Amino acid sequence: MIWSIERARAIADRLAPRLTPRIVIPVGLLLVVVVGLVVGRVMAGLGSDDRLVIGNTAGTLSAVLQVHDTRIAIGGGNSYADLTDFVDRSTLPWKRRIELLLIPGWDSRHLAGALGLVERGPVGGIAVIGTRGSEQEWGIMEESARRSGADIRYLAGEHRLTIEDGVSLTFEAVAPGDQTDPGAATITLNYHGAKIVFVDATTSNQKAWNSVRDDAGTQILVSLRSPADLAGQGARVAIRPAARRSSDLAESGAEYTGDLVTGSRLAIRLRPGEVRIPENRLSKAASP
């Protein structure tokens, strides 16, 4: 299903309107890894330029995407306060309205953090990537959304949202299979030729990871919950939650890896033809 920004506005006036050294990458995009001090102008960075901020919210990753004045949150985490705190630290006080909250919904792992943000508000609309679970928390979410005026939809299959020319989000609910394949959600950001893929899946879900592995066009791969092998051989940069145990450590398969500990954030600046990531937040893979 293809969504335009106009249709998204209509939905979130009930669903959430705007459901909207240097390395050379094959598509002609420049992925620029820059020194942290260059990116460290916090207030200026929050108030200007398109950007993607990724943070560890209680052991899982969440993100805030800003394209001009459209802000979209992804994830949630299993702590009621962590997503709200992450959004507040990633936006200016007068620019905290989230037009759309995207929640991977194949299980309830992200539900607590998402609920906290919806109840604090303002959130224009909520899209759950997957079908409604049987947990009572989904009913609480629906009631909180109703009270706040945010429409909520459960989305099966694949959907596409155009934010503006050259910028779109594609999100897909991967149907569950057997016990090693409980379901998954993927969200793909296409930003003027740059491709950033978010995956919410367990390490045992080979269907989801094989799909990512087969996609050679990914520049940045973000695993929302798995600290282990990201199957990121096709990505230049892999971002994942830091492993809590040494036994969980694994090579990401990418040239650069960012492991985010709880409470930490990584700001990625987006410009047409260019993606900027702080060098001091990434580790480079050892040469074979």
Image (cartoon, rainbow, N blue to C red):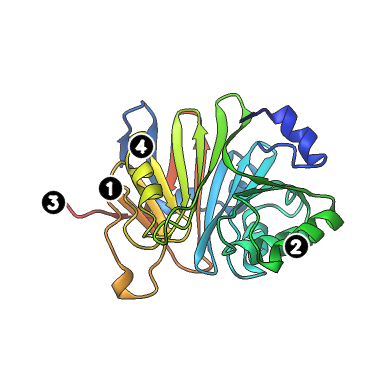
| Mark nearer the N terminus (4 vs 1) | 4
Residue at image position (64%, 63%) is: 111
Query: Which is closer to the viewer, label 4 or label 3?
Result: 4
Q: Which residue sits furthest left? A: 288
- Which mark's residue is nearer the viewer, 2 or 3? 2
For mark 3, what is the residue?
Answer: 288
Amino acid at dot 4: Asp
Q: Disc 4 vs disc 2: which is toward the camera? A: 2
Mark found first going from the N terminus, 4 or 2? 2
Q: Do the CB atoms of the residues marked 1 and 3 lie less than 8 Å apart?
A: no
Q: Is residue 70 above or below residue 252?
A: above
Residue that mark 2 sits on: 139
* Label whose residue precedes the other's in the sequence (4 or 3): 4
Q: Secondary structure at mark 4?
A: loop
Mark 3 secondary-structure assignment: loop
Kindly identify which numbered label has been placed on residue 190. none
Task: Determine whether label 2 and label 3 are within 8 Å by CB.
Answer: no
Q: Residue pushed farthest front?
A: 178
Q: Could you tell me how far apart the alpha carbons at marks 4 and 2 are, in whole angstroms? A: 36 Å
Q: Under tag 2, what secondary structure? A: helix
Distance of label 4 from label 3 (alpha carbons): 23 Å
* Distance of label 2 from label 3 (alpha carbons): 51 Å
Q: Position of residue 78 (x, y in %)?
A: 59, 68
4 vs 1, front mark = 4
- Residue pictured at 78% horizontal, 40% vertical: 12
